[in-house]
Amino acid sequence: MRAYQDMVFTTAARLTGNAGQAEDIAQEVFLRAYENFAQLRSSASAGGWLKTVATHLTLNHITRYRRRWRLFTEVFAGEPADDALESAAAEIDELFAHTDVEQRRALIEQALERLPAHQRVPLVLYHFDEMPYREIATRLGVSLPKVKTDILRARVAMAALLTRGGLEASPAATGAQS
Amino acid sequence: MSTPEEHSQGRSLTSSQDRAQRLERLMQHALSELPLRRAPARLERRVAEAIEARAGHASRPVSSWPDGFGRKGIATWPLAVRVALLACCLASAVVVSLGMTAFGSFIVQLIRLIPTEWLVGGLLAATALYSMLFGLLAIGYSTLYATPERSRP
């Protein structure tokens, strides 16, 4: 369990954006692993099994209450403007130029947690789990265009959150600049 | 040959895609730097406690009757218990059938008291309301659950 607990917890935490919920899900994942211990003990793919179960349980947890507001996110979804894409890319470039690795990691984790669930979940599945758009759409029960739009908007929102987080983290620096 | 407007539109689209792809690459680079998050130290203890709790629950007898009496088939029950159960079942059946008969006759009398026009009007209103509810549920279901791609040609 020690070898995999960080991986299982991280999978759940990045999808839910909530450490408490991630802990509950991680506990359930390891209970399922305990029930299948005989098969997993000799399996070389135990890590993959745990990752799959963690993703599956987390998505179940997230989508359980999500259908109520899916209609509204479908209605208000739209492509971000070109300017927004350009400035988002510039903001990420700035982030890389003015922060060290540790700062960046903390900012990115914070920004991920602040994203709304309908943007964070497809973004995490795409970038961390390397899941293709179509599979994400199937897993989340939404249309393919919505997945693409949500991921694009999530990247733009992430860039804005990273910039805001960077400014909050270093008020002295911004004060010195002004 | 493409018109200048089409050419301009195509260039704009490519430029937009380029920007989106650049943003995707940058985001992938930023996210790939993230290490795994450390699981809380108490997780291991929580899992161990949950396993113990489940094991304790599984080892408890399903029935509180002596000697697992409730888990055995009716054929193995003592004769007195079987007779008592049969008597209870028969009594319940008699009570239910008498009650149903009385309730049925009450309903028939009630219907006779109501004018026919009211009955027909009530039935029509109920049918209309049911159809409306069914339609609303169908619209709601297709909006919330049906994948839009499936409905496209």
Image (tube, rainbow, N blue to C red):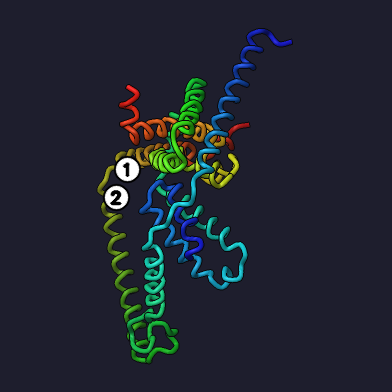
The image quarter in which residue B65 lies? bottom left
Task: Please say whether residue A174 is visible from this viewpoint.
Answer: yes
Q: Is residue A13 above or below residue A82?
A: below
How far apart are labels 1 and 2 at the CA level? 8 Å
Kind of residue sitting beneath label 1:
Leu
Q: Is residue A160 above or below residue B104?
A: above
Task: Give the residue furthest to the top.
Answer: B4
Between residue A144 and residue B26, name the one nearer to us.
B26
Residue under the point 26% across and 52% down: B110
Classify 10 Å Cα crowding around label 2: few (below 14), some (14-19), many (20 and above). few
Task: Give the residue furthest to the right.
Answer: B1
Between residue A76 and residue A5, name the one nearer to us.
A5
Residue under the point 32% across and 74% down: B92
Mark positioned earlier in the residue sequence (1 or 2): 2
Residue under the point 47% across and 41% down: A101
Classify 10 Å Cα crowding around label 1: few (below 14), some (14-19), many (20 and above). few
Q: Are marks 1 and 2 in contact (CB under 8 Å)?
A: yes
Between residue A104 and residue A147, name the one nearer to us.
A104
